[in-house]
Amino acid sequence: MKKILLISDTHGYIDDKILSYCKSVDEVWHAGDIGSIEVVDKIKRLKPLKGVYGNIDNHLIRSEFPLDYKFSCENIRVWITHIGGYPNRYSKRISEGSASPITKAGAFYVFSLRVAGDDVREYSFTNRDRAVSMRSVLVSHLAQKMQLDTKKKVI
């Protein structure tokens, strides 16, 4: 099993204690607001680094890291982002990320939507405009469901 150090919001400073933790893991994942390229260099000297840029990061960091990073690690899908929203106010980008792009498969336009966990639903349409419209409606519905689920957990 791969050992991961997940950090964020270093804001241009990384303590020697954190760097010592880097030595004991296989990879470091940084969830944004790195703050300076020097932090990146220090981590990369020790371990492989995956990350995203945050709202305070400059053009150098933004040119090296994406806003969202989606990948698989040991058969687990991972999505790193800096600010995905807040309970009851998730970014549309987050709910959009639950839906695959629309692709053409034979005579159909298809997409899938991850509803929860491993619950994936597939949709197909013969009309592309209808597929675009339904994808938008379903993503919006999912965003509302995420907000309701969060409210239930808080109460």
Image: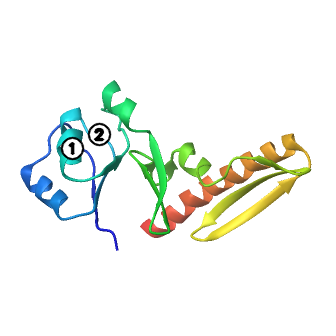
x and y, in percent, of residue 113 in the image? 68, 58
Position of 139 compared to 23: left or right?
A: right
Q: Could you tell me which quadrant the C terminus lies in?
A: bottom left
Label 1, residues with CA under 10 Å away: few <14, some 14-19, many ≥20: some
Position of 14 compared to 114: left or right?
A: left
Looking at the rendered structure, the secondary structure element under dot 1 is loop
Residue type, label 1 = Thr
What residue sits 29% from the left and 40% below the top?
33
| Residues marked 1 and 2 touching at CB (< 8 Å) | yes
What residue sits 61% from the left and 60% below the top?
145
Position of 87 compared to 97: left or right?
A: left
Q: Which mark is residue 33?
A: 2
Q: Which residue is mark 1?
A: 10
Label 2, residues with CA under 10 Å away: few <14, some 14-19, many ≥20: many
x and y, in percent, of residue 41 in the image? 21, 39
Looking at the rendered structure, the secondary structure element under dot 2 is loop
Q: Earlier in the sequence, mark 1 or mark 2?
A: 1
